[in-house]
Amino acid sequence: MNSTWPVLTSLIAFPLVGVLILVFVQKEKWVRILTLIFGIIEIILALPLLKFKLGSSAFQFQEFHPWITQWHINYSLGIDGISYLMVLLTIILLPLCVLCSWTYIGQRIKEFHICLLLMTSACIGVFVALDFVLFYIFWEAMLVPMFLLIAIWGGPERKYASIKFFIYTLAGSTLLLVAMIAFYKQAGTFSIPDLIAADFSFRFQFWAFLAMAIAFAIKVPMFPFHTWLPAAHVQAPTAGSVLLASVLLKMGTYGFLRFCLSLTPAASVYFAPMMIAISIASIIYGGLVALGQKDMKKLIAYSSVAHMGFVTLGIFIFNLRGAEGALMQMLNHGITTGGLFMLVGAIYERSHSRDISANQGLSKFLPAYLFFFGLFSLSSLAFPGTNSFVGEALVLIGTFNKNMVMGLLAIPGALLAAAYMLRLLQKLAWGEPSAAGAQEWKDLNLREWIYLLPLAILVIYLGLAPGLALKTMDASLIQILNYVTK
Amino acid sequence: MTKFITSGIILLPLAITLVAPFFIWLFRKNINLRETVSFVAATSTFVSVLSLVPKVLSGHIYLYHLFTLLPGITVKFCVDGLSLIFAVVASFLWIFATSYNIGYMRSLKEHAQTRYYFCFAVAIFGAIGVAFSANIFTLYLFYEIITIFTYPLVAHHQDEDAYTGARKYIVYLMGTSKLFLLPAMIMTYVLAGTLDFHLGDMVHGIFPATADPMWVTVTYILFIAGLAKAAIMPLHNWLPSAMVAPTPVSALLHAVAVVKAGVFSISRVILSGFGIQTMNALNLGIPTAYVAAFTIVAASLIALTKDDLKARLAYSTVSQLSYIIIGVTMLTPMAVTGGLAHIAHHAFSKITLFFAAGAIYVATHLKKISLMSGLGKKMPWTFGAFAIASLSMIGVPPVCGFVSKWYLVNGAVDINRVILLTALLLSTALNAGYFGPIVYKAFFEQPRPEVNITEFKEAPLTMVVPLTITAMISVLLGLYPEPFLQFIRIMMK
């Protein structure tokens, strides 16, 4: 491929091509196989991204085409250290999602896979868009397939959950729309690099920050805007939960970094103490509520609130360690929580229940399953040597560096993570087998091994050798921190 | 001047203990082969640890850097005198524990033996890792591995009692490490910019003189509270609860590997992390010694009240562990020598006591001391070993406990701390108070009417031989304590 090959466009467009092809495929089996192949091709298409230049804070793989000239809206794409790893994660997840839905999804199979492809396309778009309007389009575009994933293939209360998800997120996007237009009125451009370069009055920044921060806080979600998340997670099918946890939530924290800190640095500094307080509240609150859950998915959903609290904490303490930790934690949470949701899906296919009490005492029948569950649980509680430890330690180092007392306040969150994950793991592995047919359940099959193994390898790899990942992000983070600390 | 050698050879004991569990699992169908793996692993671990001794004794320190996670946070190993004390003891006693395990587990027809041996081996891997840690992160990593993999051993019986005990175990150990040790580690990183221990001398630590004394003190307190495996009061309660585990676990893990990982870590953090200079400058040592002194006396008093043999031994362990802490925190050469020597000396004697308790249980199914009258005649080897080990606990020459006590008392006199001295002497009397009656009952009292002892005989040889040997080693170490004292001298240089 030559150097002018539009890598990013190909990544966004290819899933859409896949959708077009799927429309004409009738056989269900072929729908699955083709989507899997699309996923693998998408990974191949992403290979040029490996040429990503380390140590540069500039946007790379840039593409620029004028689009609606009278409004100064352009088709402008590019990635930097903040979006790079998230794009890779999104791409890796697509084939894994297809595999984990292979038998889980039994109806409207074609539509389901179309939704998956649309989601992938929109998610990549969100991370690579360098034009505010384009970003907004992708941001809204991913709402619909996610809504459908929950509403059609979800659990018994899917209607409530999907509508709640839609309304919450849409309410946030509306504020984002207002902020976007306000920026245009002030600066006369939608280009994100141009907006970053522009200077805005504090008064303007104050309101713009608020509008954007609420939108992103809903997406993250930060306490007290989190109530849509457990409902959505519990009802969503496995692949929906995985995408929701691994990619969608990250858009909120990505938004904080890309928009709040970069565009409204003065207001970010002004609001930082409040954001830190809310983050710590999220960490503790999420952990406490997770501790009391009977439903596995709900437990993991609330743990997400806590984990994402660490991310926002890392972002708003404004030092490099914290910011690195935040980005690492975004990636880690995607890997670990994605893995945990896949495992919950796998056991649901056997027991037809997500209650902890219905899935106890598996250690004797499902050792391989418990091996993975143990690994992802340890990662989730930030066991040293796993990926989450690196993220959490970096955030904590940053926090302690800024203020010892603040750091000590966040520590109970780490304790709670150990408490709820070990409790879950203990019951699953050791409890009295509650389901009558539990002895008959088969251990992981080859397909399940295939979709769990890549994530497990990432857990260990990033846990022991996070250096390369950190190198991809450092330059961009230093750049962003310059805005808020100057 | 200490010379550092960078050599991957120190990974060998770690590699063996890492690989052994998988072979144990692989041979789960053939139990004789499975136990052979444990034996071979234990012996080769011990030999590979021993092979490191000559260089260390000639004043070298092994170092090996495995991974870099973040600048200043690495997985890095070192072997110096202190490492060897713990590693030699843990790997050597693992050999005996394996023999004992076979007798115990097969006699009682315990379930899930493969899981048991698997976790047992991983726990030793953790212990060796802790012993070889060259920085706080590596220490933390292996410390946590021990916690996670000993949980299944404590909960082994999988009944109500086991779950309750195991829950307490994990809540105390994981809770303190998350709540205290994790922030302590991060605060060290923030204050010192590194987590690497200062090896080679015990005077200097890693905290710069400019570090805020208040936060250094807070970090110190968090370390002491976070390393709850040392069972310093009030964070000792998990240890008696852990006694629901099968007795070999109590013997090797809760008298040697796990608890010694706790006291070893505290010693390492104090001697190589803070350094005597910082400890003295901030006056951190003596207050800790007072807490340890309190633990010594209070735990002994509680031990007096226990009729369950393992519970009494557990409180005795709580008390004896604080001997090590009190020695290290008195910070004089004599006291530190006594404390560190006790890591080894206590191990040999206490494992004998637990081995004996398990042998009694296998042979008679008795747990209560009050029912053990007259058993000595039926089980002379077991109770003979028990008596010798008791003398060590009390600190009677020529058994090895006396050597530690000698140095500790000398240390307390050196710094004129009457209260610490009193605690040590009082403890001697209390130890005699709770071990004496057991031995007396066994040998000199008539059997209780409700217990029919005519059928009783010694436990299987795989159990009696190890406990006899460990008792003999306790005596040998009392007569010739050099093996472990030389490691400490090399540290002191």
Image (spheres, grey):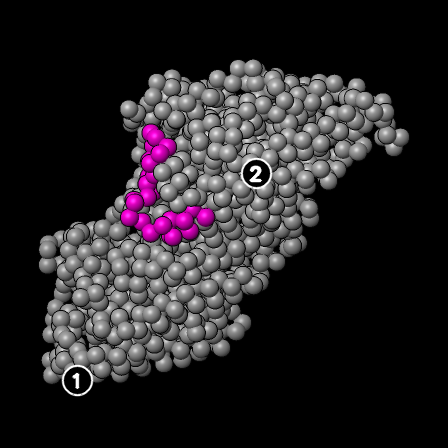
Magenta highlight on residue A274: no
Task: Report the amino acid beneath label 1.
Answer: Lys
Question: To which residue does mark 2 refer?
Answer: B419
Q: Position of residue B124 (x, y in %)?
A: 50, 32
B306 with respect to B46 (left or right): right
**Residue B248 coordinates in the image, percent (x, y):** 62, 31
Amino acid type of disc 2?
Answer: Ile
What residue sits 43% from the left and 67% below the top?
A282
Mark number displayed over residue B191? none
The x, y position of residue B176, in whole percent, is 50, 49
The boundaries of the magenta stretch are: B195-221
Q: Are discs 2 and 1 located on one and the same chain?
A: no
Eyeballing the image, is B340 above or below B222?
above
Residue B197 falls inside the magenta stretch = yes
Q: Tag 2, which chain?
A: B
The residues bearing labels 2 and 1 have C-alpha atoms spaced at a distance of 77 Å
Local SS, label 1: helix
Q: Which residue is mark 1?
A: A185
Secondary structure under badge 2? Answer: helix
The foreground one among B69 and A153 is: B69
Which residue is located at x 45 percent, y 46 percent? B223
**Closest to the observer, B225 or A469:** B225
**Does residue B172 show up?**
yes
